[in-house]
Image (cartoon, rainbow, N blue to C red):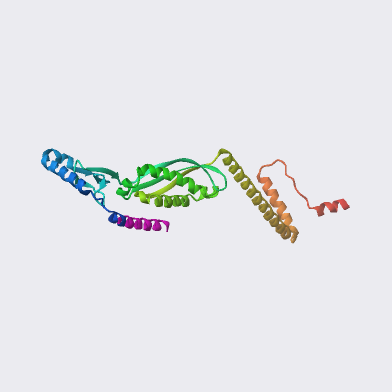
């Protein structure tokens, strides 16, 4: 269900970004700007055999080029992939990589909601969804996303207690992804995935948790042993009631015990006698 909601939100983001790109106004160059563009075009035509090598640019399949003409964006969309034409003197390009980038969040010492200090690190996967916004709206989209991921990790884990940090990693990662994706929307960045790698506890806390777990296991073992003795006593009581109904059953039990002792090759055999037989001899 969460994956469907995530895919739906990404589709909605894509539609909204297309609308924003289509509505982004193209900067006007003005009279002086157009004059410089015409002069640049004249020199390109005049020095055609030489300038042709500076007019064509190529970007790879995974790249896009944002073109600035006299400091203004020339088109609503980034150029590429493939080959395109620019004016050497007035146009400048900035290449943007659209491939997914992954980076490790450095270990962060975080104080949880129940006042326990833990050290947590993670990994973030993101990519550029709007090349123009990633160039125009932020100085360095990659570095800004890395710094924001560190602060987001601290903010999200600060609202969780230790038990939630250890057991609900998937929920924490999803919450971080939503927060990062919303914060980096204006930068043209789409956060695809966030994962919590490791949670390191202090050594003293590890010993305390181990002692607590060992005590809990010992308590369960004692309870199980007590329940076994209780069940055994009930079974012995029922067996004694059955033997009491028939005196010959007790003799058969004696013979079975002697058979068990003899099978072990013992040199001494103790033969039990019934008390009623001994009492008869004592009376005489």
Q: Residue at x 40, y 52 (%)?
A: 182
Residue 272 location in percent, x, y?
76, 49
Q: Is residue 255 left or right of residue 165?
A: right
Residue 226 location in percent, x, y?
68, 51
In this view, which residue lies farthest toward the right? 284
Q: Is residue 59 above or below residue 7?
A: above
In this view, which residue lies farthest toward the front? 31
Q: Residue at x 66, y 44 (%)?
A: 264
In this view, which residue lies farthest toward the bottom? 245
- Mostly what secondary structure, the magenta segment? helix
Residue 276 location in percent, x, y?
81, 54
* Number of numbered markers: 0
Residue 136 magenta:
no
Q: Is residue 161 left or right of residue 102?
A: right
Q: Is residue 87 left or right of residue 227?
A: left
Q: Does any portion of residue 99 appear in the rendered image?
A: no
State the residue in front, 275 or 148.
148
Q: Residue at x 32, y 47 (%)?
A: 136
Q: Does any portion of residue 254 appear in the rendered image?
A: yes
Q: Residue at x 66, y 52 (%)?
A: 228
State the residue in front, 222 or 165.
165
Residue 194 location in percent, x, y?
42, 48
State the residue in front, 51 or 209.
51
What's the magenta region?
Answer: 1-18
State the residue in front, 267 or 130.
130
* Quarter containing the N terminus: bottom left
């Amino acid at each position: 269900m969460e994956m469907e909601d995530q895919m739906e939100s990404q589709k909605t983001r894509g539609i909204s970004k297309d609308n924003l790109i289509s509505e982004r106004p193209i900067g006007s160059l003005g009279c002086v700007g157009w004059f410089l563009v015409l002069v640049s075009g004249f020199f390109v035509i005049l020095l055609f055999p030489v300038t042709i090598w500076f007019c064509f640019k190529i970007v790879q399949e995974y790249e896009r080029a944002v073109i600035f003409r006299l400091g203004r964006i020339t088109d609503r969309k980034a150029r590429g992939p493939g080959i395109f034409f620019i004016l050497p003197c007035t146009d400048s390009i900035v290449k943007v990589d659209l491939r997914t980038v992954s980076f490790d969040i450095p270990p962060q010492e975080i104080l949880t909601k129940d006042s326990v200090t833990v050290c947590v690190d993670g990994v973030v996967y993101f990519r550029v969804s709007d090349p123009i916004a990633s160039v125009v709206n932020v100085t360095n989209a990659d570095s800004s996303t890395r710094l924001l991921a560190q602060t987001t990790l601290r903010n999200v884990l600060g609202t969780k207690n230790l038990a939630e940090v250890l057991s609900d990693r998937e929920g924490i990662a999803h919450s971080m992804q939503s927060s990062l994706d919303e914060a980096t929307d204006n930068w043209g960045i789409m956060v695809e995935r966030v994962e919590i790698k490791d949670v390191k506890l202090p050594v003293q806390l590890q010993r305390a948790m181990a002692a607590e777990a060992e005590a809990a296991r010992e308590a369960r073992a004692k309870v199980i042993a007590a329940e076994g003795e209780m069940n055994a006593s009930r079974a012995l009581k029922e067996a004694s009631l059955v033997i009491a109904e028939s005196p010959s059953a007790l003799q058969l039990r004696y013979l079975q015990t002697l058979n068990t002792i003899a099978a072990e090759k013992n040199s001494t055999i103790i033969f039990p006698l019934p008390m009623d037989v001994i009492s008869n001899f004592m009376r005489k």
